[in-house]
Amino acid sequence: MPTPIQIVLIRDRSKPESEPYRDALRLAFEGSGADAQSPTAYLDDAVDLQIQVLEPDFERAQPSIERLLAAARDTLVVEILPLPHSVELTRQLDDLKARVGADHVVSVKIPDPPTEGDRQRYKHRPDEVEPTLMPVVTALRAMETARLVLADSLKAASTGRLKFFVSHAKIDGIPMALSLLGLMRRIREASCEKVSGELRYFYDVEDIEPGSDWRAVLEENARNSVLIVLRTEEYEKRYWCRQEYLWAEQMRCPILVVDLRTRPYQEGARLPFGPAPQVHVHDGNLIRVLLHAIACHLRPLRLEARIQLGESRSTSVPRRIVLPRHPSEISLHSAVKVLRDTDPHAEEAQIIYPNPPLHQFSLDAVQPILDDATPKIRLITPDELEDQT
């Protein structure tokens, strides 16, 4: 069975300055750590998305493009310019890009170094991404483009641009929110190709128009974004912060919690933070936040695509909902309601959540919710699903 999506990297192997781009892509999609002295260290602790980054040698080995594309349902091509002046490489690369389509291609030019010897070559603009960060920006662009490709293949409702909803308490979260928004703006400006890889965000002060129903705007955006929670000391004490979180949880949206608390003692959580992934920015690395925020949305799409490919061999496909993380009581109740309301006469439905499986104690606790539902609903992981097919 082919994999849902793969990344094919094309670069000039003779240029050492292209190697950080290769390393950044592999970290972003395949996970693992990075050398602390490398530019790719900004992608430290990247999550394994189970998306392989391939680097075929078109100049020497001349691999079969048909065989390469057959390994995945979708292929994303990332080319790092400039490429070697080779007639054969140009022919094969043009053939490859024509087969995958323009929306499956990310092209990046290695920027010139800002200095040459002791001389400054150009003045760095305040809104410009530094050349050292361009491999990381390329990886983020490739992740967002891969997300769009998967969403389009799945005909998912989230085929539009990814939007980050920055949820924060005004009293102590504004400095971090502004810093994160500033980074998003700079990375967005670096993506001069507005076709793919553009980062969007929602920030209430900027995006709620005068005269609009601000409650309705908040709810709509919290339900259709990746919620980035800036969990400061005051976050859970604020009514609208709690409401934004619960809206996103109810709609089963991806959530990333940035834990910014510093006090040695904390009261118990008022919100179901447990299943949501969390990151720390003790070193000021806000790129880590963007990396994991995109991964929060890309990972369940890749999961659903994997399930869909497996179902193509089956004659009977039950109604299903794929959760972006382990279920909470809120997301589980919401999923059961959707399945009951959309197809109440179905014999079976599935709620699929990421590996690993829940502990039996947890399964026993939620089983009454599933038993009372019509149709009969099974809570299952992808690995368990494959074992039964």
Image (cartoon, grey):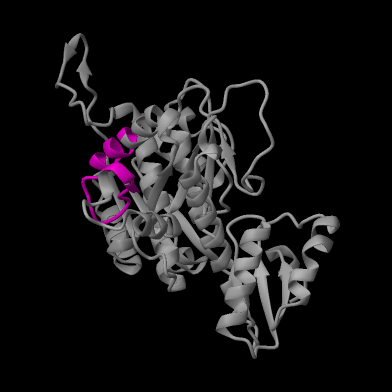
Identify the residue shown where x is 53% and y is 32%.
Answer: 44
Corner quadrant of residue 383: bottom right
Of residues 368 and 37, which is closer to you in this image? 368
Identity of the residue furthest to the left in this view: 122
Q: Quadrant of the C terminus?
A: bottom right
Q: Is residue 82 visible?
A: no
In the displayed structure image, the side of residue 126 where residue 48 appears, left or right: right
Count of all numbered marks drawn on residues in the image: 0
Residue 244, image x, y percentages: 47, 51
Residue 381, image x, y percentages: 71, 64
In the displayed structure image, the side of residue 294 where residue 188 appears, left or right: left
Residue 32, image x, y percentages: 59, 37
26 w.r.t. 100: above or below: above
217 w.r.t. 100: above or below: above
229 w.r.t. 221: above or below: above
Q: Is residue 92 visible?
A: yes
Q: Quadrant of the N terminus?
A: bottom right
| Magenta extent | 182-205
In the displayed structure image, the side of residue 8 where residue 268 appears, left or right: right
